[in-house]
Structure formats: structure tokens, C-alpha cells
Image: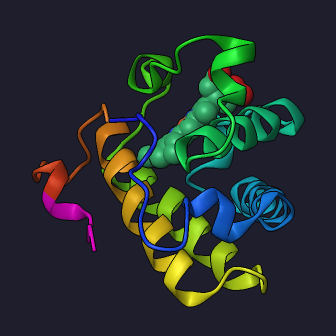
């Protein structure tokens, strides 16, 4: 699930987005997370380390150097998220923050933004570990493409 996504034409997503735009995206994303009423209660008040870990993870996930693995070991992301109640609503809020951050990061072109969104939507659906009030099926709540 969190193995690096395959190469496509033009190099890895990491190469096409570039480290600076990826870093800007992650910074913007956590600014939005901190302001989100569904997400902020389950995140630490200081998001510095969380953002560092996410940047390291995404770098490897998108085909760049495996920075997260080198520092923290295997991501085992679903297990690492189990202490947090991730409902379908929170999954959607996470993706909405990411979509907004993608739009707010001008150096990420549309094709790369769409590819990144699709990859992250799959991971986000996998992170949901707590049923919502609606009791619907998790997978159906996410637009994967
Ligand atoms: C589905 C919605 C999601 C929610 C609500 C969520 C929430 C969280 C929370 C509360 C933490 C702990 C923050 C901390 O204590 O520093 C965390 C950590 C993390 N999340 Fe998520 N997350 C979601 C999806 C994702 C996705 C899709 C990815 C990857 C693409 C991801 C990657 C990470 C990473 C790398 C960490 C740091 C793990 C560590 O402690 O080493 N998360 N997330």
C-alpha cells in the first residue's frame, strides 16, 4: 500500500514535482490541518515533527530517496494511525486539505496534482479505522480518481 508508486512517463512524481514544491505543499497542508475542526483535535499542537515525517514519507513514496525509512524504519502507516480515531469524515477532511494545498502550491502542475491526489486517496481510504455515524462502507466514500 505504501510502497513507492510506479514510474510513469517523465520520471517519478518526486522528480516532476521537485523537493521545493513538495516541501511547500506539506507546509501548506499542515497549516490547513491545524485550522480544520475535524482534524485539529487529533493532531499535536506543534506540527513541526509531523510535517517533517510527512515530507520524508512522501519523498520516498513518490519515488525519491527513502528518507522516512532511513530515519524511522518501515512506515507501517495503518498501524501508526491506529491510535487515532480516523473516521470517514476525517479521511475526507484530510483529502480536502490536501486538495486545497495542491491548488495553493502554484509550482505543482495539474497533471502531477491529479496523480498525487489519486495516490493519496487510496492511502487515505486505507487509514480509516473507525466507522462514522453513517455506517457506510469506507471505500465508497472516496473518489479514487
Ligand atoms: C485519512 C486521514 C488521515 C488522518 C486523519 C491522519 C492523521 C494522522 C495523525 C493524527 C498522525 C499523528 C501525528 C503526530 O503525532 O505527529 C499522523 C501521522 C502520520 N501520517 Fe497521517 N492521517 C491520515 C492520512 C494519512 C495519509 C494518506 C498519509 C500518507 C500519504 C499519512 C502519513 C502520515 C505519516 C507519515 C505520519 C507520521 C507517522 C509517524 O509518527 O512516524 N497520513 N496522521
How many discs appear? 0
Residue 83's place in the image compared with 1, above or below, is above
Q: In x, y percent, where is residue 123? A: 38, 45
Residue shown at 41%/34% (left/top)?
3
Give the main secondary structure of the magenta stretch.
Answer: loop
Above/below status of 3 relative to 22: above
Residue lying at the far front of the rendered structure = 10
47 or 27, which lies in front?
Answer: 27
Which image quadrant for residue 66?
top right
Q: Is residue 95 left or right of residue 131?
A: right
What x and y, as percent, mark residue 113? 55, 77
Q: Which residues are magenta?
A: 140-145
Left or right: 34 with respect to 13?
right
The quadrant holding residue 99 is bottom right
Taking the magenta stretch, the answer to whether it contains residue 73 is no
Q: Is residue 114 left or right of residue 51?
A: left
Tell me where residue 53 appears, x and y as whole percent.
73, 32
Front-most of 46 and 72? 72
Quadrant hosting ligand 1:
top right
At a point 41% along the width and 66% down the height, the residue shown is 8
Q: Residue at x 45, y 78 (%)?
A: 114
Residue occupying image coordinates x 59% and y 65%: 98
> Can you name the residue that lies furthest to the top here?
73
Q: Quadrant of the C terminus?
A: bottom left
Q: Is residue 143 magenta?
A: yes
Find residue 15 and report its horizontal and vertical position in percent.
Answer: 67, 61
In the depicted view, which residue is nearer to us: 141 or 63? 63
Q: Is residue 73 above or below residue 18?
A: above
Q: Quadrant of the N terminus?
A: top left
Amino acid at each position: 500500500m505504501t510502497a513507492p508508486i510506479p514510474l510513469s512517463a517523465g520520471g517519478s512524481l518526486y522528480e516532476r514535482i521537485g523537493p521545493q514544491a513538495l516541501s511547500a505543499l506539506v507546509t501548506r497542508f499542515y497549516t490547513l490541518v491545524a485550522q480544520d475542526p475535524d482534524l485539529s483535535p487529533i493532531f499535536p499542537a506543534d506540527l513541526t515533527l509531523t510535517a517533517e515525517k510527512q515530507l520524508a514519507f512522501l519523498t520516498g513514496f513518490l519515488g525519491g530517496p527513502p528518507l522516512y525509512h532511513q530515519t524511522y524504519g518501515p512506515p507501517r502507516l495503518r498501524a501508526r494511525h491506529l491510535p487515532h480515531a480516523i473516521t470517514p469524515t476525517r479521511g475526507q477532511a484530510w483529502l480536502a486539505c490536501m486538495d486545497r494545498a495542491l491548488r495553493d502550491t502554484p509550482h505543482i502542475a495539474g497533471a502531477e496534482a491529479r496523480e498525487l491526489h489519486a495516490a493519496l486517496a487510496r492511502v487515505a481510504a486505507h487509514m480509516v479505522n473507525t466507522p462514522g455515524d453513517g455506517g457506510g462502507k469506507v471505500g465508497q466514500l472516496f473518489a479514487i480518481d
